[in-house]
Amino acid sequence: MMTLVLPLSEPGAGPSPLMPHTAEIVFGLVFLILLAIAFAKIVVPKFEKAYADRTAAIEGGMNEAKQAQAEAKAALDKYNAQLAEARSEAAKIREDAREQGAQIIAEMREQANVESERIVTHARTQIDAERTQAVASLRSEVGSMATSLAGRIVGESLEDEARQRRTVERFLEELESSESARQAVGTDG
């Protein structure tokens, strides 16, 4: 195997093909400097402007987002305050309704009590009237029966009305006094 080695430059052969000429190096450096200046004067400001615009747009978007977030928070706080107010108002309305319901129930009970007292009083009055009427009717019937029975027993007519009335009244008084005595003994014992 054979290795091929090329000498970079031979001492008498002239300029090396790998090394550029000095004029090319100077021209390349001048072109590079002009290119850097043109890049710094034209391209870099456009990049800076685009970067600044983008930064401003991002910051503006962030500010708008913060503002929208603050508005949303304010709206949420307002909604929560309204909701709390509505809840307290609903609780107040429920409490008022309970109180009114209790008041209506109390009024209805009072009316029912008054009506029941009126009915009981009327019933008692009616019962007393009917009892008085029944007692009067019984007195007359018992009187006539007692008179006819006494007439049969005695054998004479007791048709005299004044005599009949006195006899009946005496009989009923004795009956009432014996009944009163029986009730007094029953309640004492």
Image (spheres, rainbow, N blue to C red):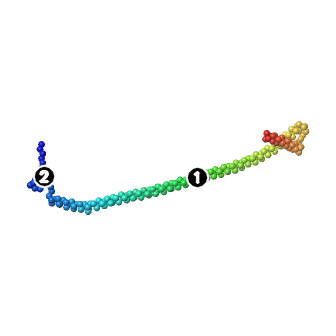
Q: In x, y percent, where is residue 21?
A: 14, 58
Q: Nearer the viewer, mark 1 or mark 2?
A: 2
Image point (58%, 52%), residue name: 95
* Element assignment for label 2: loop
Mark 2 residue type:
Leu
Image quadrant of residue 176? top right
The answer to whether residue 172 is above or below residue 89 is above
Q: Nearer the viewer, residue 169 or 107?
A: 107
Image point (12%, 45%), residue name: 3
Does residue 72 appear in the picture of this structure?
yes
* Element assignment for label 1: helix
Disc 2 crowd rating (10 Å Cα; few below 14, some 14-19, many 20+) is few
Disc 1 crowd rating (10 Å Cα; few below 14, some 14-19, many 20+) is few
Quarter of the image containing the C terminus? top right
The answer to whether residue 67 is above or below residue 172 is below
Quarter of the image containing the N terminus? top left
Of the residues under marks 1 and 2, which one precedes in the sequence? 2
Image quadrant of residue 88? bottom right
Q: Is residue 86 left or right of residue 120?
A: left
Residue 95 badge: 1
The residue under label 2 is 8
Q: Residue furthest right?
A: 156
Mark 1 residue type:
Glu
Q: Nearer the viewer, residue 161 or 82?
A: 82
Image quadrant of residue 149? top right
